[in-house]
Amino acid sequence: MFTITQNIKRHKPSTLSWFVKQTMHLSAIASLAVSSSMIHAETSPQTTTTDESGKINRADSAVEPSTTLPTIVVTADINKQVTENTDSYTIPVASSATGLALSARETPQAVSVVTHQQIKDQNSNNLTEVLKRAPAIQVGSIDGARSGFSARGFGINGFQIDGLDTDFVQQAAMGEYGINTAMFDHVEIVRGATGLMSGTGDPSANVNLIRKRADSSVPATELSADVDRYGHYGLSVDHSQPLSESGAVRGRVVANYQDSDTFIDRQELGQNLLYATVDADVSDNTTVSIGASRQHNKSKSTMWGGLPSYLSDGSKAEWDTSKNGSANWTNWDSDNVYYFADIDHDFNENWNLTTNASYNESDSSPKLLYMYASSVDPDAGLIYNLNPFHADTERKQVNVKTELTGNFDALGRTHQVIVGGSYKKSDLDTFTYTAPPDGLLPVSEFGNWDGSYPEPVWGDKTQSSDVTTKEKAIFAATQLQLTDPLSLILGSRVSDYERSGFQYGSNVNTESEHIWTPYAGITYDVNDNHSLYTSYSAIFQPQSERDINGRYLDPIEGKNYEIGLKSESDNGALQSQVSIFRIEQNDLAQLDGGQTIPGAGLEKAYVGADGTSQGVEVEVTGQLSDKLQATIGYTHFNAKGKNGKAINTGYADTTLNLFATYDMNDIIPNLTVGGGIDWSNGYYGIVTNPVTGRSEKYGQDDVTLASIMARYAVNENLEAQLNVNNLFNQKYLAGENFFGLTYGEPINVVGRLTYRF
């Protein structure tokens, strides 16, 4: 979208001077975090106990009736990294940032966790819906099947499942962003570069999805059904049970079916998910887990690209939110299959060895029609530019990671260490069908377009891409407890990266050897509730964008700095963090003025540019009182190019997210109510007006989206929940760029029934 001039030199303050200045501001905003954690004196104890049958019970359950249904029975050995059945918005420990199982206060980086309870309360059925409501994360719509995620002014490309790096290739649109949450316990989001654990240190954030496990010692089943105002309906079953008399072998099966009309005319979406896993305690010290999942994604009459941006008089277009520019025969269906196996062995109480492996196959065979025009008369105008597309795409991935973690004593103190290695390989093959040689008929009366357009007679099938990507790495990190309040985390990763093959006639061979991505962090406990931290991480990120000549851009290289304050209540049920960050990186991909790569269909061309982003994030999550639970997030950043001009302006630079639930049991027994606000300031792109020929801003003003929810426990087995999203029915553009327009969902009402036994 933007061309960055790279030959203008400007004096920049040193990183040290910038941090000194920002530290002065920290004291002003830190009071929010300090104040939030002081509320811990008013929160009720959240101690979880287990009785002889292994059931989890609240300490105060005998005092008053519960407003939630009875929890599912689980094994007595409670995993601190599992959020299911805890009713909590916080988690005791997480390991996505450093590989070490650390509490939020011990982690010298901004980390957010979307727990199982948050996913349920907000009725988030897929990854995109989870991230839409996550603090400091932005979600933009590219078209009917693709979305874009961003944080701190840059796109998010780093994804993991159970800590294993997983490529989500939006160019091929395999449906990964719509991955179903029914098989996941929670989502961990580490903001800033994560080169230590993910190798390629994306400067925005890394998203780690943690699967549900077979953890029940007695049979337990959950059934649910949901509907919404647009014709969506879904059915789900989640069943766990022991597979041996002792409970040493346990199984779990999750099945989910969704089918849906949407707010967009003629568009149909759907999902079929089957997930199964078995956990087996093969000895007192060793657990083996195996599992598989298959998700089919249905996407009919789906737009490829957005609606025209301008009318023939040079004015900006405004369409009904239900407008669909696709043809009736189009589809963007896809399938994702995962197999995984884990071995976890405790040598003793201090040392543990884990090996995780997964294999993934994804494929799609889209038939699409891309309509694009410099302008269009909505009543009688013609769109002369039509691009039909039909392809068969398959991607295969192999991931393996081994980690040795442990505690050791030195200088009278106990420290932690992790040492490991990883390997991943991804093969992407695409076969395309040629379009009719004589072109297509023009589309008339776009204002009344109803999708009635004949499917082309597709030509020969040829291989257009064959790309293999490999990365292998070794890594190590240690947390050194220097004094009682002071700890130091040091780590590094050495990676070898290789891409080979061809794509649309261009050779894609690139190789980077022995890439060193160091990591350093310091935490200092001010007292039992507050900690200061600072961290540094290197950035190395290979890019999939290509320039006008079809060559891949050089990898992004840079640095990520962060300082902050973290706080928590005495019982850990309330956590807060204030983070100040600065990102410096080179060769960041920027759209080359909307140009496309010759011979590569409609693939956009990019140029590399230097960029920086600096800003602040504030987050408060957890139990504000014994009745009120909330997550509140605020972020502001300033992203600029080498010449001082704003970059990535398609992302809002200021956002506020708030969601809270309140236990109404004292007033109306068994009722919980809640609601939220998601606000972002304006964002824009620079677009050439096709009539005047002038460059001008095309954007979206501030957006405020409100939501409400209510959940009622009919009895100890059955509950009903109602969610209303976009409560005030705000119309807004949801895209990251404005070469084509996409709209956000209008008001929607979703009802759900859940039965547990």
Image (cartoon, rainbow, N blue to C red):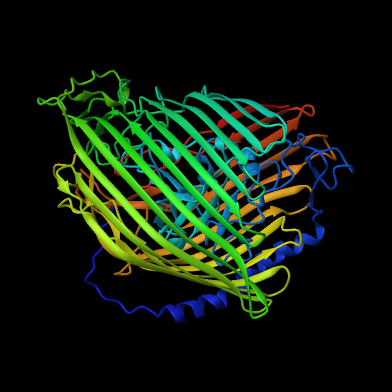
Q: Is residue 441 left or right of residue 26?
A: left
Q: Is residue 170 left or right of residue 235?
A: left
> Can you name the residue that lies furthest to the left here?
438
Residue placed most toward the observer, 714 or 266: 714
What residue is at 57 percent from the left and 55 percent from the top?
112
Residue 200 in view, yes or no? no
Quadrant of the rendering where the C terminus is positioned = top right
Residue placed most toward the observer, 167 or 297: 167
Task: Give coordinates of residue 348: x percent, y percent.
Answer: 65, 59
Residue 723 to residue 358: above or below: above
Task: Give coordinates of residue 513: x percent, y percent.
Answer: 29, 63
Residue placed most toward the observer, 136 or 29: 136
Residue 466 to residue 607: above or below: above
> Can you name the residue that lies furthest to the right here?
63
Task: Give coordinates of residue 142: x percent, y percent.
Answer: 36, 41
What residue is at 17 percent from the left and 42 percent from the top?
504
Residue 238 in view, yes or no? yes
